Image (tube, rainbow, N blue to C red):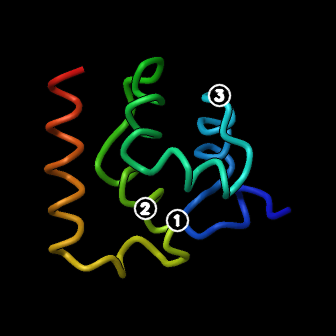
Amino acid sequence: MEKLVDLPNIGEILAEKLIGIDIYTFEELVEIGSIEAVLKIGETDSHTCYSMLYALEGAIQNMRWHAIPKEERKILKEEFDLLRTTN
């Protein structure tokens, strides 16, 4: 089983935040998705941002977040903002 810190974009701090919301594996991250993971982290941590969203999505896609196409990042941001305002 791969450690969270072995995934692209995930360092010790972000791995700790994921563990704090009971995500311990890549499979669990994929299951919850980047948007829901950031929303859950945001319930107890006010330091969430779009960069965290993109980092997690990049980890799911096995790429550095900078490589996520701009249009895809735009869609992620829009979905995140919509869910954040309705929760």
Residue 60's disc is 1
Check disc 3 and give the amino acid type.
Gly
Q: Residue at x 85, y 62 (%)?
A: 1
Q: Earlier in the sequence, mark 3 or mark 2?
A: 3
Residue 57's disc is 2
Q: Nearer the viewer, residue 44 or 36?
A: 36
Give SS at disc 1: helix
Check disc 1 and give the amino acid type.
Ile
For marks 2 and 1, give the CA distance. Answer: 5 Å
Q: Nearer the viewer, residue 52 or 23?
A: 23
Give SS at disc 2: helix
Q: Quadrant of residue 70?
A: bottom left
For marks 3 and 1, give the CA distance. Answer: 18 Å
Q: Is residue 86 left or right of residue 65?
A: left
Contact (CB < 8 A) between labels 2 and 1?
Answer: yes
Q: Quadrant of residue 68?
A: bottom left
Characterize the local packing of mark 1: few (<14), some (14-19) or many (20 or more) Cα atoms within 10 angstroms: many
For marks 3 and 2, give the CA distance. Answer: 18 Å
Query: Would you name the residue on which mark 3 appears?
Result: 20
Closer to the eye: label 3 or 1: 1
Whether 26 is drawn above or below 22: the answer is below
Q: Residue at x 24, y 20 (%)?
A: 87
Q: Residue at x 61, y 39 (%)?
A: 18
